């Protein structure tokens, strides 16, 4: 019997892979059907976002930031205004904080929906993709009604939001919440106990608790490995502490656990939105607006030329000579910005800590020893967006 020893085969997956995770290239070393090694190649979507930030004022830079993670655009805007707010200690009116919270949670639901669809399509289930697009369209309608844009909203401002919620928006949003919760249960009935789905995800891509912490993972990747860490509870930003909600987490650390965490997060987000909509306070929606109300009738912002401006820009102010790291709990993990001011209108350094980039590090270790078909399952469960990975 002749034993033929074949050389391992090297396959390039990408850069344009049919799965919708952006332009990622994987150089995979295969022995038959087994993966020996996998090397992700990044940088196809690099646009120099950090360098652009250093030559723009914060208000000029705001429309750019929605292009990092273009599925959870509100979070990139939140971090962009939170950093200078904390640096210069600007107060945000309570109503603005609530509006921000509602927008962030809607954005989280939209992001998780567009994670669920392609993830199921990667595994081979086409149906959920059409379902999630139907629900996501409604969230985008709400965004369009409030901000004028469906995806790149340019809505947050330093010290508040650009414009108040339109008349009837809150009722519309509550209607959406009532409509959406049964739909999540429908997804669960369709997917969670499906034997084919379970065969594909159970025990695939297991990350232990210690391992997840050591790799610096965050978000659902970390919480699926049994670590109860959510920046909304840890950092107490906006008004999350005033509402009643729980951290979603699982112990197993496999692809199924990550799926369950994200499904749970969608339900919790709807819970947060419902509570916030019911208890949203009145008052100004922006710091500038608050000062305008304090000035009374004499304010120059009541003049004729200011009458028709709906999205009032924040004033261009100087960033003090300090440094600060600020983070929010984005749908994919901890999105942070390290900001160094320089007594000028431009930031001296604007370092982005994208969750997708850091969660992607663990991919080669997860796929080693797995089958070729499991690469898509594991990559899908990590939930990366290349706009944010490459910046």
Image: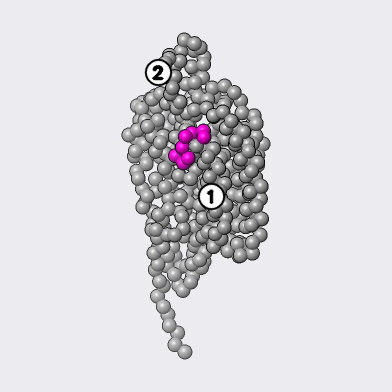
Residue 209 visible: no
Dot 2 falls on a residue whose secondary structure is helix
Q: Residue at x 51, y 37 (%)?
A: 143
Work out whether residue 135 or residue 330 is closer to the camera in this orientation and state it.
135
| Disc assigned to residue 133 | 1
| Disc assigned to residue 149 | none
Assess whether residue 147 is covered by the magenta stretch: yes
Range drawn in magenta: 145-152
Discs 1, 2 touching: Cβ within 8 Å: no
**Residue 372 vs residue 50: left or right?**
right
Assess whether residue 72 is covered by the magenta stretch: no
Q: Residue at x 62, y 44 (%)?
A: 180
How far is mark 1 from mark 2, CA to CA?
Answer: 41 Å
Residue 4 visible: yes
Q: Which residue is mark 2?
A: 305
**Residue 59 vs residue 141: left or right?**
left
């Amino acid at each position: 019997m002749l034993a033929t020893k074949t050389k391992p085969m090297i396959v390039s997956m990408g850069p344009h892979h049919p799965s919708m995770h952006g332009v990622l290239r994987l150089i995979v070393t295969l022995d038959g059907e087994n993966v020996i090694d996998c090397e992700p190649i990044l940088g196809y979507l690099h646009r120099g976002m950090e360098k652009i930030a250093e030559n723009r004022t914060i208000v000029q830079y705001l429309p750019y930031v929605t292009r990092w993670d273009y599925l959870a655009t509100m979070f990139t805007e939140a971090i962009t205004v939170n950093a200078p707010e904390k640096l210069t200690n600007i107060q945000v009116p309570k109503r603005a904080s609530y509006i921000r919270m509602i927008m962030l949670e809607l954005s989280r639901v939209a992001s998780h929906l567009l994670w669920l669809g392609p993830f199921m399509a990667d595994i081979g289930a086409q149906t959920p993709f059409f379902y999630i697009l139907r629900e996501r369209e409604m969230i985008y309608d709400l965004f369009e009604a409030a901000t004028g844009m469906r995806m790149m909203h340019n809505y947050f401002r330093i010290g508040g939001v650009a414009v108040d919620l339109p008349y009837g928006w809150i009722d519309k949003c509550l209607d959406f919440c009532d409509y959406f919760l049964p739909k999540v249960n429908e997804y669960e009935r369709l997917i969670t106990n499906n034997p084919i789905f379970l065969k594909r995800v159970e025990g695939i891509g297991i990350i232990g608790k210690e391992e997840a912490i050591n790799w610096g993972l965050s978000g659902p990747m970390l919480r699926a490995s049994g670590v109860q860490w959510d920046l909304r509870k840890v950092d107490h930003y906006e008004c999350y502490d005033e509402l009643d909600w729980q951290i979603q987490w699982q112990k197993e650390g496999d692809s199924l656990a990550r799926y369950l965490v994200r499904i749970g997060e969608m339900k919790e987000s709807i819970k947060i939105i419902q509570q916030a909509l019911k208890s949203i306070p009145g008052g100004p929606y922006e710091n500038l607006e608050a000062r305008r109300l304090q000035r009374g009738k004499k304010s120059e912002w009541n003049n004729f030329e200011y009458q028709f401006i709906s999205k009032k820009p924040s004033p261009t102010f100087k960033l003090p000579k300090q440094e600060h790291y600020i983070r929010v709990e984005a749908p994919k993990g901890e999105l942070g910005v390290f900001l160094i001011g320089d007594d000028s209108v431009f930031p001296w350094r604007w370092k982005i800590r994208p969750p997708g980039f850091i969660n992607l590090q663990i991919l080669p270790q997860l796929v080693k020893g797995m089958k070729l078909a499991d690469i898509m399952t594991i990559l899908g469960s990590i939930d990366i967006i290349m706009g944010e990975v490459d910046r």
